[in-house]
């Protein structure tokens, strides 16, 4: 398991343009699932372009610490689990 934000960013950089599902904890016993494409990575956050058929907004951004603290998980369509796998 990567222990640094730099390692997580490098792994996400290798998946740019890939389709993924973001599973996020939004509250007590509440989980949201959003499908989209990993669009960009920045030094502190990454951006996912969402599927417009299922969502009311175009983009969503998450920080690498969300992955590190397991607030969100990423499931890529190629079978790769998370950026930490």
Image (tube, grey):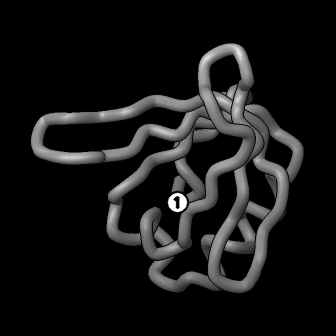
Does 60 sit left or right of 14 as displayed? Answer: left
Residue at the left extreme, as displayed: 28
Tell me: residue 82, above or below residue 77: below
The residue positioned 78% from the left and 68% from the top of the image is 41
Is 68 positioned to the left or the right of 52 in the image? left
Which quadrant of the structure image shows residue 18? top right
Q: Taking 5 as reference, is 30 above or below it? A: above
Q: Residue furthest top?
A: 53
Secondary structure of residue under mark 1: loop
The quadrant of the picture occupied by the N terminus is bottom left
Q: Residue at x 56, y 82 (%)?
A: 5
Q: How far from the left and from the top, in percent, is residue 70?
A: 34, 59
Q: Is residue 25 left or right of residue 65?
A: left
Looking at the image, residue 85 lies above or below residue 75? below
Q: Number of labelled discs?
A: 1
- Position in image of residue 27 (x %, y %): 19, 47
As rendered, which of 25 and 57 lies closer to the eye? 57
Q: Nearer the viewer, residue 85 or 74?
A: 74
Please say if 67 is above or below 23.
Answer: below
Residue bearing the label numbered 1: 84
Residue 82: x and y in percent read: 53, 49
Of all residues, the one furthest to the front in this rendering is 56
Residue drawn 43% across and 38% down?
A: 23
Q: Residue at x 34, y 58 (%)?
A: 71
């Amino acid at each position: 398991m990567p222990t640094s934000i730099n390692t997580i960013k490098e792994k996400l950089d290798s998946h740019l343009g890939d389709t993924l599902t973001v599973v996020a904890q939004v509250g007590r016993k509440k989980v949201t699932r959003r499908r989209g494409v990993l669009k960009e990575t920045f030094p502190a956050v990454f951006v996912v372009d969402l599927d417009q058929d299922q969502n009311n907004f175009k983009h969503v951004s998450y920080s690498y610490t969300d992955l590190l603290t397991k607030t969100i998980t990423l499931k890529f369509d190629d079978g790769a689990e998370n950026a930490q796998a």
